[in-house]
Amino acid sequence: MSATAVHNLWTMAAADPIDKIDAPNIEYGQLAPTLIVIGAAVIGVLVEAFVPRKSRYYAQLFVSVVALTAAFAAVVALASSGYGTTKARIAAMGAIAVDGPALFLQGTILLAGLVAIFTFAERRLDPVAHGNRIDSFVAQAGAVPGSEGEQAATKAGFTTTEVFPLALFAIGGMLVFPSANDLLTLFIALEVFSLPLYLLCALARRKRLMSQEAAVKYFLLGAFASAFTLFGIALIYGYAGSVTYGTVAKVVDGTLTTVDPALAGTMGNDALLLIGSAMIVMGLLFKVGAVPFHMWTPDVYQGAPTPVTGFMAAATKVAAFGALLRLLYVVLPGLRWDWRPVMFGVAVITMLGGAIVAITQTDIKRLLAYSSIAHAGFILAGVIATTEDGVSSVLFYLGAYSFVTIGAFAVVTLVRDAGGEATHLSKWAGLGRRSPLVAAVFAVFLLAFAGIPLTSGFSGKFAVFKAAAEGGAGSLVVVGVISSAIAAFFYIRVIVLMFFSEPKADGPTVAVPSPLTMTAIGVGVAVTLVLGVAPQYFLDLAGQAGVFVR
Amino acid sequence: MNPVNYLYLAALLFTIGATGVLIRRNVIVVFMCIELMLNACNLAFVAFSRLHGNLDGQIIAFFTMVVAAAEVVVGLAIIVSLFRSRHSASVDDASLMKL
């Protein structure tokens, strides 16, 4: 017996090792905006760990501003080298789309995030306490409100500088959300931007019980909605056997070339497709704050620290509408006869519901929350247009709306009394006489919200309503104009309250902010006026960015 | 066993979880119900993965577990801070802000 034969009695040759697994091909250049922001967020966490407490604020602010500026430069570089139009492609092994809408929305989110970071960093609104400047965020999140621990933390001058990395993580998730090209990336991005936002909501320095309550409500409802999204993704996966947008779209359209027997079994099952897509869209509508998924909006907007509210109201809406557009326009165009009537209904009740309930509000932050619900309805009008103009009008509207929102909430932080921000509307009476400049700026924002000509609100509303009318939703435009008129009533009422009523003796004072908040408000006013008076350049920009890659 | 049965089980678990979120009043229990919903999603992913004979669903289940873990961290931090300031974990007690 030969040596080999003996060996073969109790051993066998191992299978050839798999000599080559294709390494995933990641286009770092095209993903640069997201990678810069997430990388900076990680650096921010390290800053929290290693930099002495006194210098953390400056280090964090520096890292955040540099990262957001660099990421915006990367977006501009990508767009100017044609990735928004002719070179649009799908990167990261099919997970991320780099195309016009993605780059436009990423640019918007980054700029809005940068402006919001300025309002986060504001430390001149409250008087100096124990020799330390204080910002809008709690001294120590773990300390029980009103306890000795909290007083000690305030006395020691602690500040929650973790808000900067948290905001960066949220922005990172928001950058991925509208560019996600498969359902798993969509879900992960949703969680990556939601989880930091839940925490940011809980960190208000004043009215901490309300802030914590807002965080719990937002967290429970947000997690509930994302569970629905996930189950919807599971059903779509069951229907199409894949979570990639392109493949799912092909299965929906029935244009797939190779169909295996299992897929042939499931792709005939419309219940999976319809229920699945309804559940995913439900999760996105929740983030957008559309009626009937809006219940969290007023409470969370009121309870959260005001800079966070502004950030949330602007950036979350941009990201969520981007994802909604891509889902409906790339994955589900084959179902448009099913989803258009549903979105039509949602748009109508969102516009009317937001505008009507806002009339009864007595708190300025809740009023702006309901106003943001009504605006979600206006944007949905552009979404259901299902034309290229529909996409670009929504992009333009989102860009215009986000800066106005951040500016408006920044003004809310300025009007203060002994208990912090004076958000009750009665306190705002006569603000125009006490502080004409602040009242005038706020009036500009309110007029933009109302959609008065020569403000960005008018250009945006005109664009979406025009797209909706041309897309065959004329009756929606009628409802939109009616609810704009209702909404104009309560915006004008606030303006009248500010300018034409007597200031109260114990009224609030208007704090003089540092250049940070001034920049945020200034950018808001500038965008409002520029996009209102000369919108054409930006309309063209959005028009060029209106085509999705598939 | 036919993988479709697992889908029925997943749908049932998801419904139990959703019902629990709506009717239970203790924050922790509500949160556990949300976790139940996420796990029902996992079961559905794995069952569909078996049905289609590709691995995507099983990979997604791992991602879901990591997300659920991250959600527990954030959620419990918020819930514990609420409990410490209110000495109550009822969702009905947290009602400073009303319509």
Image: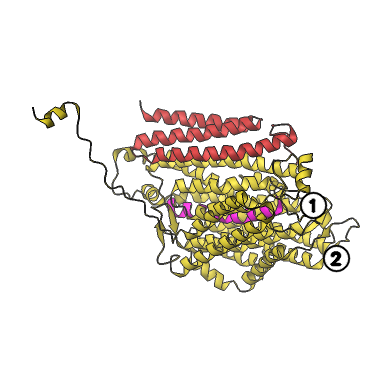
Chain colours: A yellow, B red
Return the mark for residue A281.
none
In the image: residue B70, left or right of residue A12: right
The disc at residue A433 is: 2
Magenta span includes A61:
no
Residue drawn at 66 percent across, 30 percent down: B26
- At which x and y percent is residue A192? 54, 47
For the C terminus of chain A, the image quarter is bottom left
Count of numbered tags: 2
Q: Quadrant of residue A117?
A: bottom right
Q: Is residue A231 visible?
A: no
Question: Which amino acid type is marked by label 1?
Answer: Gly
**Which residue does the numbered mark 1 point to in the structure image?**
A420
Badge 1: residue crowd in 10 Å (few <14, some 14–19, many ≥20)? some
Magenta stretch, residue numbers: A305-331
Q: Single out the residue that lies furthest toward the right.
A: A505
Residue A91: name its quadrant.
Answer: bottom left
